[in-house]
Structures are given as C-alpha cells and as structure tokens.
C-alpha cells in the first residue's frame, strides 16, 4: 500500500503551497490561537471568523459580532474580550459566532487556502484530530505558526506529538527532516512538558505580559473532541 | 557582563540580514560544501572562490583556475573534479586557488554579506572555530544551509554541537528557540552520530547517487584547525 506523506513546516516562511494541494493542513499555534479556537468549539461556539487586522475586527464589532482581540497583551477597547482560551467560556460563546483577531493565524490560513482541507490542531484536541486524520486518505502537513516567521519550540513539539501518533499508525511515511526533528524534540519534551516549555521564547513573552495563566491548560491533551475546520474562510466544527 | 547573543538559522528562507549586521555568521552545509572547503584548507589551498552557476564556473576554468563542479552527482565535463571533500587532496590543491561550484552555499554567502564576518563551519574544524568565536566579542549566528530552503537534520545537529560548546563558555545567551532545538537534537544525535544521520533525507539522496563515501569523514571532528573566512567574496584562511 502506498503510504501517505507526512510533512512538517516550521514557519510560514517555509510553507510551499504548490506541494500541498491535495493535503490536509493542520495549523498549530498553541500559545494561544489554536488552543483558544479549540476551547471555543469545546464550549459550543457555532463558528469562529479569523481576521488579521484590528480594523477588520472593529468592523465586525460594529455589525454586532462578539470579538476577541488583543494587541501586545491589551484587550482592544472595542473588543468583548482578549485572546486567552479562558475567555471562551460556554456562557459567552455557546451557539454564537466569534471573531478572533490573530495576525499570524489568519495569514497562515490564507497561505494554506489552496490545500485540500485546513484544520485547527492543538494538544487540546490531539486524539480526536489525529484519529480523524488517520481515517482520511490525504497526505498531511503539520503547519507550525512559529513567531514572526521564526521557528518556535511550542508548536514544534505539538507537531512532534501529532507526528508520533500518525507515524505509529503505519499509514504514513516521512522523508521530511522537519518531521523527524519534531518527533525527536517531542520525545525529549514529553518527559517534562512544563519544564521543557520554560525554554521557549514565547513562554517568556507571555510571562512578561502576565498572559501565562493559560499555559498549563494549553499543554493539556484531549480537553475536547472537536475538530475546527475552515469552510469558506470561517472555522466550523468538522462533521465526522 | 553583557552576554553575546547566539542564534541559529535553519534555512536561507529564515535569515534576517538586518538582525545580524554586527554578528559573525557561521555557514554550515556539512554534506558536503563546508566539509569540502575545510578539507581544502587543511590541505593547503590558498583560497576558494565559491560560485553559484555552471556558466560562472566554466568562465573560471577558461581563465585557468582549478574548478570543482557537479550537478546531480555528475562531475561537469569542463571541471577538474567533483564536490566531494576527498577530491581536495594536498597534491591537487596546495598553494592553489580553487573554484567551488555550490548554488546553495554561494547564495547564503551573498545573503550574509552585510554581517560583520562570514566563516565556514563543519565538524572538521569545530574545536578551532568555536574556540576562535569565543575569543571574539561579536554575537554569533549559526546559519544552516538546509536544502532548497528547507530545514535539514545534518546541518542542524552540527549547529547544535557548536551551540553546545559556545553556551558552555558562559559568554553567550540565547533566547532563540532554534538554538535550543539544535542543542537538543544534537544531544540525541551525538549518542550515535552515524545512526542518527540515517534519518536525514540528504543521507538518502547521497546514497542513491553513490556519493555517500565521504559521510563518515564529514562527521569527523577536528580534522583541521583552519578557519575559512570570506574576504571580498573569496574564502581564505583566517589569520588568528
């Protein structure tokens, strides 16, 4: 049987859209965008509209949408709440459409728009999503958001955790050095995940801004079985 | 004391020239360009001219230069020999200027041209070069050549080995996730270096082309104490 290809991309600057037209792209930005989005779906959000710019978020607010938007750790004055997963409570989001302002995430979704499917991955939905991926027939790209086009550790180890699970199914092969590196880094990180994350630059950035209260939560596996998927630029729950 | 910054760049697509104007950039492309260049200097070459294109290499040949040039594993008809380190014997290169055709390597040298200094790193000169770096006052960037803009394992673990040595001096600090990842991958790789390299895509490419005879040599530490450095676009031995 021809195995599916599994690849890992460490940064938007390394993404090759033409290579992945038939692939499912898993977007991984665990501190905090993809963790927040998974939490929103766990708590019954109807859909999430990812937007890049502050102006776009403000326009949505004027139209009456719930808007989650921060810049540099401060909730924007017009927004309903900030970007932490803890804001996406059932009371606030159930049955609603939420606009989520994320420069990085929105850019990545646009970059991957030529792929067969785009789904949102984090530790919070890892069993559900990796199980679903294994049932599809597509190649898979684990697309780490990184930070300002740079490699980052937290998304890489999450990708490594996905890759370890997918490779264990024997359905995939990988000649992708990034995938091997991600699996190896995960093999070290999983021995003490909170300790390992201490090395990550984003861990320091969040602490400096007092935004690190959600860190342990973002490293939690299987908080939800929801699989957010992009349909026409909007995130909805994947119907299995 | 203010520590120097140590950063690692996994691919030309991730290099940020404006960040590194005062830095020493260490170019790492161990299979096979930087290993071949270190070998040439170990064997007494006077200088190495890195060129990107076949046409440029051919022009140098017409002018009477010794030229090392391959494409897809075949020595080009006008060239004196191919790109393997084993071709740069003392008999052939001592006291001479050699033109080395390397698309990737030349592109990287051009990208890094705004840096304070550009030096050539491999396992073959790791003690000499890391010792020399520690005596300078500059920040250091370990610039992995990668493969067609992609991350690769072999350059990353070599960068990790350099980073481990430099961080051990306590002269450097790093908030660079790539550096931490490189050190961690090196910590796994060094337990069985030839075994680890089996995972690398380039290892398979070289084997498929019958060009892997130099692999064990390229993983050898301290074959030479020479430090090739770029001066006006040409590689010469660094005068300490």
Image (cartoon, coloured by chain):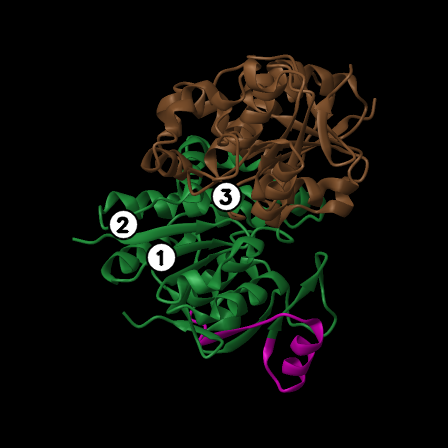
Chain colours: A green, B brown
Please identify, in this view, whether the residue under mark 3 or under mark 2 is nearer the observer: 3
Q: Nearer the viewer, residue B62 or A135?
A: B62
* Badge 1: residue crowd in 10 Å (few <14, some 14–19, many ≥20): many
Q: Chain of mark 2?
A: A
Q: What residue is at 35 percent from the left and 66 percent from the top?
A: A22
Q: Is residue B114 above or below residue A26?
A: above
Snapshot quadrant of residue B197 = top left
* Badge 2: residue crowd in 10 Å (few <14, some 14–19, many ≥20): some
Say whether residue B178 is left or right of residue B219.
Answer: right
In the rendered image, which residue does mark 2 sit on?
A172
Of all residues shown, which one is farthest toward the left? A1
Q: Are marks 2 and 1 in contact (CB under 8 Å)?
A: yes
Q: Which residues are magenta?
A: A44-66
Say whether residue B191 is left or right of residue B19.
Answer: left
Kind of element beneath mark 2: strand
Q: Position of residue B62 (x, y in %)?
A: 63, 39
* Badge 3: residue crowd in 10 Å (few <14, some 14–19, many ≥20): some
Kind of element beneath mark 3: loop
Q: CA separation, marks 3 and 1? A: 21 Å
Q: Are marks 3 and 1 on the same chain?
A: no
Q: Position of residue B189 (x, y in %)?
A: 43, 24
Q: Nearer the viewer, residue A193 or B128?
A: B128
Q: Position of residue B73 (x, y in %)?
A: 42, 38
Q: Position of residue A240 (x, y in %)?
A: 27, 69
Pointer 2 or 1: first along the chain = 1
Q: Tell me if I can see residue A195 in this picture.
A: no
Snapshot quadrant of residue B199 = top left
Q: Nearer the viewer, residue B143 or B164?
A: B143
Q: Is residue A61 magenta?
A: yes
Where residue A140 is drawn, which disc sits there? 1
In the rendered image, which residue does mark 3 sit on?
B147
Q: Chain of mark 1?
A: A
């Amino acid at each position: 049987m021809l195995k599916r290809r599994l690849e890992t991309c460490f940064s938007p600057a390394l993404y090759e859209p033409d290579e992945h037209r038939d692939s499912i792209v898993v977007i991984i930005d665990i501190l905090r965008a993809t963790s927040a989005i998974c939490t929103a779906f766990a708590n019954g959000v109807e859909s999430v509209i990812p937007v890049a710019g502050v102006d776009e978020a403000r326009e949505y607010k004027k139209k009456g949408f719930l808007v989650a938007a921060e810049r540099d750790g401060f909730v924007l004055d017009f927004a309903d709440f900030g970007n932490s997963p803890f804001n996406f409570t059932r009371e606030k989001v159930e049955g609603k459409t939420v606009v989520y302002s994320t420069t990085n995430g929105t850019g990545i979704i646009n970059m991957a728009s030529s792929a067969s499917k785009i789904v949102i991955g984090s530790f919070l939905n890892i069993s559900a999503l990796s199980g679903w991926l294994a049932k599809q027939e597509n190649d898979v790209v684990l697309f780490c958001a990184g930070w300002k086009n740079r490699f980052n550790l937290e998304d890489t180890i999450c990708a490594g955790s996905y890759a370890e699970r997918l490779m264990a199914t024997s359905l995939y092969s990988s000649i992708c050095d990034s995938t091997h590196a991600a699996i190896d880094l995960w093999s070290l990180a999983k021995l003490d995940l909170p300790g390992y994350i201490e090395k990550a630059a984003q861990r320091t950035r969040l602490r400096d801004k007092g935004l690190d209260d959600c860190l342990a939560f973002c490293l939690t596996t299987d908080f939800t079985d929801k699989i957010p998927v992009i349909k026409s630029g909007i995130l909805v729950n994947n119907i299995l």
